[in-house]
Image (tube, helix red, strand yellow):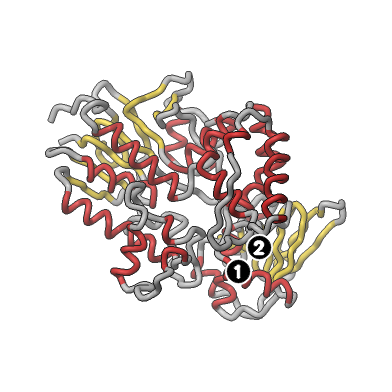
Amino acid sequence: MPFDLAIIGGGAGGVLVAIHVLEQARPGDRIVLLEPDPQLARGVAYATTHAEHLLNVPAGRMSAFPSRPGDFVDYLRASGADADDPRVAGTYAQRRHYGAYLRQRLEQARSGSAGSLQVMHARVASLEADGDGVQLQFGSAPTLHARAAVIAVGNSARPLPARGATRLPPGQLLEAWDFDAVKRITPQAQLCIAGSGLSMVDTVLSLARAGHAGPIHVLSRHALLPLPHCSHAVSGFDPGTLLQQGLRQRMRSLRVAAAAAVAQGQPWQALMECVRPQVQQLWATLSCDDQRRFLRHVARYWDVHRHRIAPQVHAQLQALIERGQLRLHRGRLETVEPAGGRMRVQARMRDGRALQLDVDHVVNATGVEMRAQLMRNPLLSALLGSGQARPGPHGIGLDTDADGALLDAHGRPNPRVLVLGSLRIGSLWESIAVPELRVQAEQVAHRLLSPALRLEPLAG
């Protein structure tokens, strides 16, 4: 029998969709969740099993449900994690707890739903729309028919942007998300981490927990580290005043407001918290030229202020820098090549000087790939190649309408195929973190299953 809804991707985004769909499902609704990984709710962010990797958002803001903001805190207390800490809502929980939380809430939604959920551990290779819905193909396996589909495939790692990277010996070039391999690095080894964002932070934390004593070189174009969160503070800044301004004026207004807050004894982080709920609207009201300028000149500075880390993690990084073990280099990576049993990293510094590092390992921490055509995902490649999808604004993500419906090569929406999460970054910019994902998941479920918006079910 055909399914009413196919959810493609079983990371945090796909599981959030499944939870909200099950909560709104009517008797007889059949949902299938398609994910090749044997364990759900892992993806990139929550695949870690290591205690040193913490959430980058306080637990009190990580609920899966917009209407129940304390739900994740309730889970932590019920599961015994920080159960006796009255301040748990303000703490930064271990990331491994969040995947377990989503899996538990999925099973609870499944057992209490009027609909049914089937989980298939398979990778979708292609999607074809037909008159009744969509056909999903799994390589040589039989097709699956669904009334509608949600694409929630999540993030993909960006390849190391250096000549020679594909020719490096196995074990010398590591991915930052391969936490176990990072921890197996010899304690005295010298290494270079390409990238200075959140993936680099995870790598350094894993190395520190494993007792690494060798030098750690961090190379990136800006050499900017993520900044820390602070204790809760409230700002009176009105982000609506930014909507009528261009990019240059907006950045000037934010700098002035941040300086004024600090002068009054308030943390600048309070200003960012005030602006965050309006980021999607702020992005959408920028002109196309200003969006390009933001991506070219502002994005990295924005990211380190917006995507902050736990204060204790930031303090740990600073301690490593102060004792000389963690060394930052501001430059562009050019080549990596074997050199006498080690690897030679060559880069061009911002002042024009050449930098050469001979190291034992290179760790790729350049972050997520935002261009769908380069994500090495068979489904996305098939959608783009067939004209059923087109790249999002500025070539990043997939293009969608305001409700998340996939746009084809001619800009026509397919109301039976919705897109969620990081693939909407070109249209929304802020579309990766849980506070945005849970809202999108709830909206997707409402659109596809509510009586007013529901498409006609397929014939059995």
Could you tell me the amino acid type at mark 2? Ile
Do the CB atoms of the residues marked 2 and 1 lie less than 8 Å apart?
A: yes
Could you tell me the amino acid type at mark 1? Val
Name the one closer to the observer, 366 or 251.
251
Q: Position of residue 70 (x, y in %)?
A: 35, 57
**Residue drawn 66% across and 63% down?**
193
Q: Name the image quarter holding the N terminus.
A: top left
Position above or below: 282 against 344: above
Furthest residue toward front: 264
Q: Which residue is mark 2?
A: 193
User: Which quadrant holds residue 21?
Assistant: top left
Q: Position of residue 357 (x, y in %)?
A: 77, 65
Left or right: 147 with respect to 265? left
**Residue drawn 70% across and 70% down?**
326
User: Which quadrant holds residue 204?
Assistant: bottom right
Task: Estimate how packed mark 2 is, as few (under 14), some (14 to 19) or many (20 or more) residues with alpha carbons within 10 Å.
Answer: many
Q: Position of residue 362 (x, y in %)?
A: 65, 64
Q: Earlier in the sequence, mark 2 or mark 1?
A: 2
Q: Is residue 262 visible?
A: yes
**Residue drawn 38% across and 73% down?**
82
Q: Which residue is mark 1?
A: 204
